[in-house]
Image (tube, grey):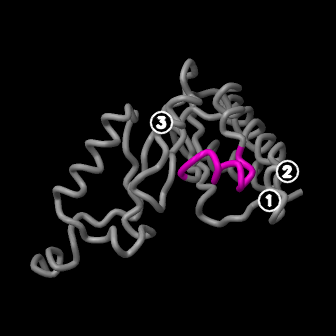
Amino acid sequence: GLQKFKLDYITKIMNKYPFDGICIDFLRHLPCLPVGKQWEYRECATEFMSKLKGNMKNLNRQMLVGAKLPENREACHADGFDIEKWAQNSLVDFVIGGSRTVNPDLDWYKEITKGTNTLVYACWDAWHLADAQHNQTRDFYRGMLSNWTKKGVDGVVAFNFAPAPKEELAKLL
């Protein structure tokens, strides 16, 4: 019942407003499957994404469907996300690998999406990073973005993005 409620609600909103896509943030509130049995219940998450993709196709306009997922295969599978199946069956148009790390396994994401139309994005979540990764130098961030680019990402998502360290923002106020 909860899955149907969420699908109906998302579809209603996407039909009402001229959005061009939706990204389901599976990292925001984990777990979303029974604890300790997430991989056993992976078909529930796959079914949700399949129904969502079908609902978006029925809106009579191009709608992209994406998912923000854990940083690597092990974490995806531990949380019950069969992203390999999602990519191979065109259930997602894009994936965002990782959110709470600056080193997601982009090689794995690129490998499992090879030969599909699924785009791969890295994520810089400026709020949920480890404390050691907050307010680094420009060279740190340039290096991070350069590494991601060299790994072939299709783009970068900035989430909870602050445009400058607190000290720099304070100077502007």
Q: Position of residue 90 (x, y in %)?
A: 66, 27
The amino acid type of the residue labelled 2 equals Tyr
* CB under 8 Å between discs 1 and 2: yes
The residue range painted magenta reads 71-81
Answer above or below: position of 33 versus 149. below
Q: Earlier in the sequence, mark 1 or mark 2?
A: 1
Residue 122 belongs to magenta span: no
Q: Which residue is mark 3?
A: 107
**Image-quadrant location for residue 22:** top right
Tally of marks: 3
Question: Disc 3 marks which amino acid?
Answer: Asp
77 inside magenta stretch: yes
Alpha-carbon span between mark 2 and mark 3: 26 Å
Q: Residue furthest left?
A: 171
Q: Which residue is label 2 attached to? A: 41
- Give the x, y percent position of residue 94: 53, 36
Q: Residue at x 34, y 63 (%)?
A: 161
User: On residue 33, which mark appears?
Assistant: 1
In this picture, is 93 found above or below 172?
A: above
The amino acid pointed to by label 1 is Leu
Q: CA distance from mark 1 to mark 2?
A: 7 Å
